[in-house]
Amino acid sequence: MRKYMKERMRRGELQFGAFVMAPSPALVEMFGYAGFDFVIIDREHGAGSLETLENCVRAAEAAGIEALVRIPAGTPSDILSALETGASGIVVPHVKDAAQAAAIAGAATYPPDGTRGFATTSRAGRHGFTTVDAHFELTRRKVLVMAQIEDAEALPHVRAIAAVPGIDAAFIGPADLSMSMGHRASMDHPAVQSAIDGILDDIAAAGGAMAAAFAPNRDAVVALAAKGVRAICLSGTGIVGAGIRKAAEDIIVRNPG
């Protein structure tokens, strides 16, 4: 039986992913073929429509990779529209306290435990080509709900956020965290790194959600993995941009002679 990302994380398997900001199903496929475990399709900062999002989710499935969606906000509408594409889960930005986390978990979960609207006629329900029982079982196993911790205001509440039923992972966003702490996107600042260590300690102490995080470089990947982070996400734009820059340096000749 296939193991979904949520299940693999719970088994202790480290998952590697990339944020995909460009609305490109082909780029999603490329990350899958390259061996990544998942992508996070970014609708907070990205420009894609819901239709493009659904095609990106299809591309992920075609390439054997899982697709999460970073939604613009934690509204029930944002959550439902992302999950109805068949995505493997959601990443919700700027979660600051347990009450907000509980509302997010509720909107992502079917009754009686939550309030998610029900339809098996969307892509998540295989356009009606499934049973209600099968759809409920797939949703239970597959849908991963991540609350993003990226504000100084959230730091006193991390343990409570991570303990909320239905929040599967707490995702650390170091760039916005550093900005909110007054360090202007300096992710390596000692105060920011200390805050990240505190977040990881609080997640572990809560005993509920798993830890996930963005990593800007290989050193950060190694450090986060050593600290028990279960899902590490890189910048897809950064990866592609680095390849383009290298190609420009190696290939483009302005004045041959």
Image: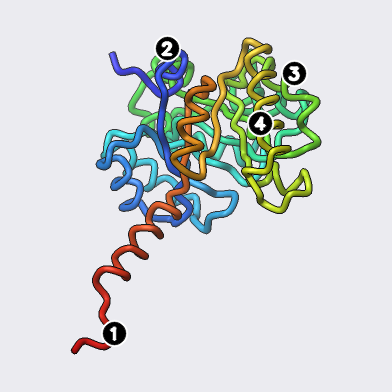
Tag 2: amino acid: Arg
Q: Compute the Cα span from label 2 to label 3.
A: 23 Å
Q: Position of residue 184 (x, y in %)?
A: 71, 53
Classed neighbour count for the residue bearing mark 2: other residues with Cα under 10 Å, few (<14), some (14–19), many (≥20): few
Q: Position of residue 60 (x, y in %)?
A: 34, 40
Q: Position of residue 72 (x, y in %)?
A: 62, 46
The residue carrying mark 4 is 196
Tag 3: amino acid: Ala
Residue 245 image-quadrant placement = bottom left
Question: Can residue 75 be seen here?
Answer: no
Nearer to the camera, 190 or 40 = 190
Q: Who comes first in sequence, dot 2 or dot 4?
A: 2
- For the N terminus, the quadrant is top left
For the point 55% across and 33% down, the residue is 213
Tag 1: amino acid: Arg
Tag 4: amino acid: Ile
Q: Who comes first in sequence, dot 3 or dot 4?
A: 3
Q: Is residue 162 left or right of residue 181?
A: left
Classed neighbour count for the residue bearing mark 4: other residues with Cα under 10 Å, few (<14), some (14–19), many (≥20): many
The residue carrying mark 2 is 11
Q: Does the CB distance between marks 1 and 4 fall below 8 Å? A: no
Q: Who comes first in sequence, dot 2 or dot 3?
A: 2
